[in-house]
Image (cartoon, grey):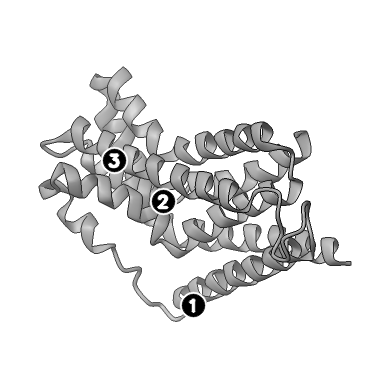
Amino acid sequence: MGTLTANLIPLAIGIAISPVPVIAVIMMLSSGKALKNSLLFDLGWLVAITALGVIGVLALGGKNVAGHKGAGPASDIADVVLGVLLLFLAARRWMRGRGGAEEKEPRLLKSIDSLRPLTAFGFGAALILVNPKNLMIALAGIAQILKADPGTGASFAALAVFIVVATIGVALPVVVYALMPSRAASILGSWKTWLAEHNSAVMMYLLLVLGIFLLAKGIVGLV
């Protein structure tokens, strides 16, 4: 269980520190429906990552692609494939930065103030299920649990740890807003400014580190 958790934490952190979801929550907290929309956004995020994890563990738990109990080479191949894909995304971001291309702001960030509660919920879910980076990292986390095959109870315990860590990034601004209302605007404003300015670099290095991590794990497992 300790080894499994150690493998899951870096992946969960990779989701937690994604700049765009954190910026989205911060912007919601300065809108007219601050707490309502931000909480629904976080709920959508939480429901999506939980549903993805639970379905993965229940549907594939104890089996590899060939249908045999325990980990097989398929899980290592999956690590290699996901690692290569993350490295590809990192390289694409590096090329964009080198070419001087402007980072496009997600369309919904431009209309945060007018988001309806249901849209905020869907936005949170989409940033897990539709965002390529977050989806691939979440799938990599599920693959680590399936590969370890610690049993149903331990699998869900590991999944819970993964989900909690992955949700810290979007939950923390709401906690700051609720506990420090008088200072929240300046604290969250400085976070938003820094994340907006360094979004591309943060994402590139994040994808690079996680890509190398998964690629190395997969290669070692296959060898």
Residue 17: x, y in percent? 48, 46
On-image quarter of the C terminus: bottom right
Q: Among all residues in the image, which is located at the extreme front? A: 67
Q: Which residue is mark 3?
A: 26
Residue 193 visible in image: no
Q: Indicate which disc residue 98 carries.
A: 1
Give the crowd class for mark 3: few <14, some 14-19, many >=20 residues within 10 Å: many
Apparent side of residue 14 relative to residue 99 in the rendered image (left or right)? right
Q: Which residue is mark 2?
A: 19
**Closer to us: 34 or 202:** 34
- Total count of labels: 3
Callout 1, which amino acid? Arg
Give the answer, above or below, for where 105 lies relative to 59: below
Residue 165: x, y in percent? 53, 36
For marks 3 and 1, the one nearer the N-term is 3
Q: Which secondary structure, mark 1? A: helix
Give the answer, above or below, for where 185 lies relative to 17: above
Give the crowd class for mark 2: few <14, some 14-19, many >=20 residues within 10 Å: many
Mark 3 → mark 1, Cα distance in angstroms: 29 Å
Mark 2 → mark 1, Cα distance in angstroms: 20 Å
Tag 3–tag 1 contact (CB < 8 Å)? no
Q: Quadrant of residue 214?
A: bottom right
